[in-house]
């Protein structure tokens, strides 16, 4: 699809739970309109950056309130366009409001430090300053929280933003964009541009006026951004994962089984932090497997688990399941399209055992409700396999052994380490991101966000007699 000059293409959004239901229509922006949005964002930057950071924070605070007030509309729209359950969306929207409140407070925090100078007549200090126009390119799987954890810090530190939501979360994106306007922003400070990444991505990565791109999505698209980004562009890429959990014999096994299934199946497995492999110490293997299956049995398709987001995702996940069968893994739970769910893109929660480390299911990101279960002799064997991956986003260890908990925190090659916690989840005050192929550039959220969205001035003021 191409955005043609002067003429807007219309994109129809269908419900993945019921692909015959038309949810709404989105008008794609033309290339000219996207360029205009970038030019306006640059013009607006010169005013926005001079606003008091406290005033910028107040707009985010107001946005948080409005996000809360519009929770039902946001949750229902997102659920109908990308499939997540309304309950999951409501949780995400609460998180979104808390992200906004956290970054609203940033408007009142220090923006630099005073340093001692070698000269008695000099005052030496630093000040964080914004970059200019920032582009945010966001995925469909967290249609509210991920845009907010990029847009909120970008704005509070004084940047203006051109935001391109995924076309599978475009309707939610429109609503969120309007909420920012109601809170007092202008379209030039935050503009929402709609259209396919293949067209808009190119414009955003090449635009000389755009100083930085923050992106969350697939490795394939991330690599394209890395290749096509204009030289000197600052990049923050949050990409895939192949996150592992390890369950040791001394762990609270009920907790471990519950959090491993939640980690694997929440949001239908469509999280970059999802648990997709679990290593179980052989002494408790049979018992834990039984509990994993019992936890999976509690999931109700269409009630506690939504469909996958699109026909493409549906076909790719089913192909990954078939490949696992072909490669010799044993299917112990689920494994197919859901029965009795009409034409919706529902896939059963799926568990495979007898998985070996060279199978695709142990190595490649599936981004669906599929868990590979692997028996290990002990902790050392598990750790070696956990680290033997190109990805390094998140990992979990379930144990009550303090020494091993610390050992795992040190030796596990992932950006997010969880002891007796699931692999997914992120709190706004803590840095989020991975190692290896999972991330590129500074971390998101917390104080780490400042590093990406600002640059530093070092100022020396002489006061000679
Ligand atoms: C979470 O686990 O709650 O796209 C957050 C993703 C990640 C965010 C995960 N960037 O799934």
Image (tube, helix red, strand yellow):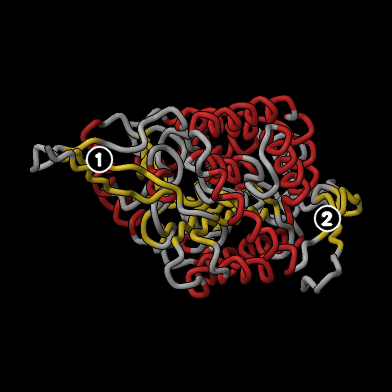
Q: Which label's residue is closer to the chain start, 2 or 1?
A: 2
| Viewer-proximal residue among 307 and 176 | 176
According to the picture, the residue beneath numbered tag 2 turns out to be 26
Above or below, 70 against 376 in this view is: above
Can residue 462 be seen from the camera position used here?
yes
Q: Position of residue 197 (x, y in %)?
A: 66, 65
| Viewer-proximal residue among 26 and 190 | 190
| Viewer-proximal residue among 303 and 211 | 211
Above or below, 285 against 226 in this view is: above
Q: Position of residue 347 (x, y in %)?
A: 71, 51
Can residue 342 be seen from the camera position used here?
no
Q: Which residue is drawn at 82% across and 51% down?
A: 344
Above or below, 82 against 363 in this view is: above
| Viewer-proximal residue among 9 and 305 | 9
- The secondary structure type at the circle numbered 1 is strand
According to the picture, the residue beneath numbered tag 1 turns out to be 125
């Amino acid at each position: 699809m191409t955005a043609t000059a002067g003429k807007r293409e219309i994109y129809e959004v269908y419900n993945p739970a019921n692909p015959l239901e038309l949810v709404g229509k989105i008008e794609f922006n033309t290339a000219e309109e996207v360029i205009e949005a970038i030019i306006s964002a640059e013009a607006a930057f010169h005013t926005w950056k001079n606003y008091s950071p406290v005033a910028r924070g107040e707009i985010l605070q107001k946005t948080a309130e409005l996000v809360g007030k519009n929770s039902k509309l946001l949750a229902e729209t997102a659920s109908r366009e990308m499939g997540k359950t309304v309950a999951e969306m409501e949780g995400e929207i609460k998180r979104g409001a808390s992200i906004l409140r956290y970054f609203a407070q940033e408007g009142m925090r220090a923006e630099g430090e005073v340093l001692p100078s070698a000269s008695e007549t000099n005052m030496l200090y630093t000040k964080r300053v914004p970059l200019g126009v920032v582009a945010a390119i966001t995925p469909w799987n967290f249609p509210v929280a991920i845009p907010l954890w990029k847009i909120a810090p970008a704005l509070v530190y004084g940047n203006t933003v051109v935001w391109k939501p995924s076309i599978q979360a475009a309707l939610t994106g429109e609503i969120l964009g309007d909420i920012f306007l109601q809170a007092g922003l202008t379209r030039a400070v935050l503009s929402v541009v709609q259209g396919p990444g293949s067209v808009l991505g190119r414009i955003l990565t090449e635009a000389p006026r755009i100083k930085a791109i923050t992106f969350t999505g697939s490795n394939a698209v991330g690599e394209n951004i890395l290749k096509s980004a204009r030289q000197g562009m600052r990049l923050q890429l949050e990409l895939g994962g192949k996150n592992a959990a390890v369950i040791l014999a001394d762990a609270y096994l009920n907790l471990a089984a519950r959090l491993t299934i939640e980690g694997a199946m929440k949001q239908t497995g469509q999280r970059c932090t999802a648990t997709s492999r679990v290593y179980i110490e052989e002494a408790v293997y049979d018992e834990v497997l039984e509990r994993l299956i019992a936890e999976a049995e509690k999931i109700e398709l269409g009630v506690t688990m939504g469909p996958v987001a699109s026909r493409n995702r549906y076909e790719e996940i089913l192909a990954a399941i078939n490949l696992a069968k072909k490669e010799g893994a044993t299917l112990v739970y689920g494994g197919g399209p859901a029965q009795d769910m009409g034409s919706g893109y529902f896939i059963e929660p799926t568990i495979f055992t007898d998985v070996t480390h060279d199978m695709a299911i142990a190595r490649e990101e599936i981004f669906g409700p599929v868990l590979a279960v692997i028996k290990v002799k002990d902790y050392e064997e598990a750790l070696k396999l956990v680290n033997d991956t190109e990805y390094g986003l998140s990992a979990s260890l379930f144990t009550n052994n303090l020494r091993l908990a610390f050992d795992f925190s040190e030796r596990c090659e992932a950006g997010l380490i969880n002891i007796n916690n699931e692999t997914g989840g992120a709190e706004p005050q803590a840095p989020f991101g991975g190692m290896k192929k999972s991330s590129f550039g500074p971390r998101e959220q917390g104080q780490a966000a400042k590093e990406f969205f600002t640059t530093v001035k070092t100022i020396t003021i002489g006061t000679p007699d």
